[in-house]
Amino acid sequence: MPASLCGTWEILNSTNLEGYMIALGIGSSMRKIALKLKQHKVIEQVNDKYVIKTLSTFRNYAFSFRVDEEFDEHTKGLDNRNCKSLVTWKGNRMVCIQNGEKKNRGWAHWIEDDKLHLELYCEGQTCKQVFKRVA
Ligand code: VL7
């Protein structure tokens, strides 16, 4: 049973968010704004339904899903694409594959040393983020 991802998390560090955003086709002015944001993650679970919220002072992004059940994801306010997404557990990692126009796209969340880790990847670019628990 993997450690629970649920809670409220504040970003500690981020690597290659720039490369990830370029891979998504985000323009330079939006990338500049995004790089300055202090992101929070809120992860909630009710029965078999998860909600993941990425919060910032500029914009929020949230979606909900059930593990092992493909869903339609619209990355509204990010790169504004439609994906067929699927979240599964791989050992202690919650992994998502985002099938769509962008190749080799997805993310993985896991707990390590009481921190929430996130890898976001797209077309050969990987952004790594670490969050500390705040609630
Ligand atoms: C989502 C940044 C940058 C476009 C706006 C910046 C607003 C705050 O997808 C994500 O996480 C997964 C796993 O937790 C859940 O979807 C990360 C933020 C990463 C992508 C794209 C810049 C425009 C940022 C919402």
Image: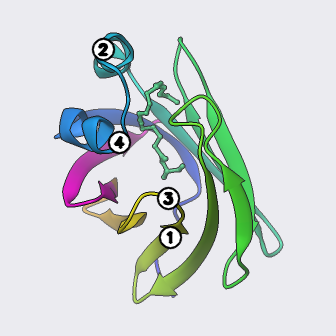
Front disc: 3 or 4: 3
Quick check: 22 above or below 92? Answer: above
Helix, strand or loop at label 1? It is strand
**Residue assigned mark 4:** 132
Q: Is mark 3 within 8 Å of ligand 1?
A: no
Q: CA distance from mark 3 to mark 1?
A: 16 Å
Q: Is residue 74 left or right of residue 87?
A: right
Asked where in the image residue 112 lies, by quadrant, the reply is bottom left
Is any atom of residue 83 visible in this view? yes
Colour scheme of the picture: rainbow
Q: Is mark 4 within 8 Å of ligand 1?
A: no
**Residue assigned mark 2:** 36
Most common secondary structure along the magenta stretch: strand
**Residue assigned mark 1:** 96
In primary-sequence order, the first of circles 1 and 2 is 2
At label 2, the amino acid type is Lys
Residue range in magenta is 118-135
At label 3, the amino acid type is Glu
Q: Is mark 1 within 8 Å of ligand 1?
A: yes
Helix, strand or loop at label 3? It is loop
**Residue assigned mark 3:** 101
From the top left corner, tell me how far across and down residue 57 is, in percent: 53, 12
Q: CA distance from mark 1 to mark 2?
A: 25 Å
